[in-house]
């Protein structure tokens, strides 16, 4: 009996013990900051939850208590307005000469940009959207969550391929149009 037990233990060690479920070894649930993908006819969108990390330029404007998760209706409203707005007229100051062609170039290729939507409440108490738009393709690991649904895509270079704008859902107006400089 003792010898058969010893042989069984030895066999199990050679073959390998089955993994036992241990709570500490379980994978953590996916973070609640992953965006919900939303496909419009003209664009791929990502709706980021209020807990998601903001792009650096917006983080100082919208502290976390003033955040909300955009709805599909919010996105639809902003997209409808985006097709009609003249980006060159959003900001009070005109573009420097070198960048003057960017607004027209961006609007000409509007359907090519992926969009990330972040909701925040501005100092006046209006619900606003931060739209982060970019043209960037990356190879993804099969079965993984795409990079642009996990985090804000932000760069300090790239010209008209990366730009952002805010939309006030209360006044139905755009403000703070920004595009990246070229390196």
Image (tube, grey):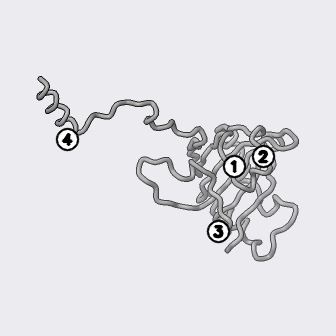
Question: Can you give x and y, in whole percent of width and height, for residue 97 in the image?
Answer: 80, 76
Q: Earlier in the sequence, mark 4 or mark 2?
A: 4
Tag 3–tag 4 contact (CB < 8 Å): no
Q: Quadrant of the C terminus?
A: bottom right
Q: Nearer the viewer, mark 3 or mark 4?
A: 4
In the rendered structure, the answer to whether residue 52 lies left or right of residue 24 reads right
In the rendered structure, the answer to whether residue 105 lies left or right of residue 43 reads right
Most foreground residue, 81 or 12: 12
Q: Nearer the viewer, mark 1 or mark 3?
A: 1
* Residue at the farthest top position: 1
Q: Residue at x 56, y 45 (%)?
A: 39
Disc 4 marks which residue? 14
Tag 1–tag 2 contact (CB < 8 Å): yes
Distance between mark 1 and mark 2 Cα atoms: 9 Å
Disc 3 marks which residue? 158
Most foreground residue, 169 or 85: 169
Q: Earlier in the sequence, mark 4 or mark 1?
A: 4
Q: Residue at x 41, y 51 (%)?
A: 142
Looking at the rendered structure, the number of numbered marks drawn on it comes to 4
Secondary element at tag 2: loop
Secondary element at tag 4: helix
Secondary element at tag 1: loop
Q: Quadrant of the N terminus?
A: top left
Distance between mark 1 and mark 3 Cα atoms: 19 Å
Q: Nearer the viewer, mark 4 or mark 1?
A: 4
Distance between mark 4 and mark 2 Cα atoms: 58 Å
Disc 2 marks which residue? 62
Disc 1 marks which residue? 54
Q: Earlier in the sequence, mark 3 or mark 4?
A: 4
Q: Earlier in the sequence, mark 1 or mark 2?
A: 1
* Residue at the farthest bottom position: 98
């Amino acid at each position: 009996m003792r010898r058969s037990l010893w042989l069984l233990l030895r066999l199990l060690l050679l073959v390998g013990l089955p993994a036992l479920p241990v709570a500490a070894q379980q994978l953590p649930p996916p973070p609640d900051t992953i965006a919900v993908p939303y496909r419009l006819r003209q664009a791929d969108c990502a709706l980021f939850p209020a807990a998601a990390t903001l792009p650096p330029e917006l983080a100082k404007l919208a502290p976390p208590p003033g955040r909300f998760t955009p709805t599909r209706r919010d996105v639809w409203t902003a997209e409808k307005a985006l097709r009609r707005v003249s980006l060159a007229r959003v900001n009070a100051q005109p573009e420097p000469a070198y960048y003057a062609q960017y607004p027209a170039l961006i609007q000409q290729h509007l359907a090519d940009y992926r969009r990330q939507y972040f909701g925040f409440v501005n100092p006046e108490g209006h619900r606003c959207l931060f739209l982060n738009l970019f043209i960037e393709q990356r190879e993804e690991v099969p079965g993984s969550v795409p990079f642009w649904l996990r985090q804000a895509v932000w760069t300090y270079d790239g010209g008209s391929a990366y730009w952002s704008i805010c939309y006030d859902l209360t006044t139905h107006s755009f403000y703070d149009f920004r595009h990246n400089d070229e390196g």
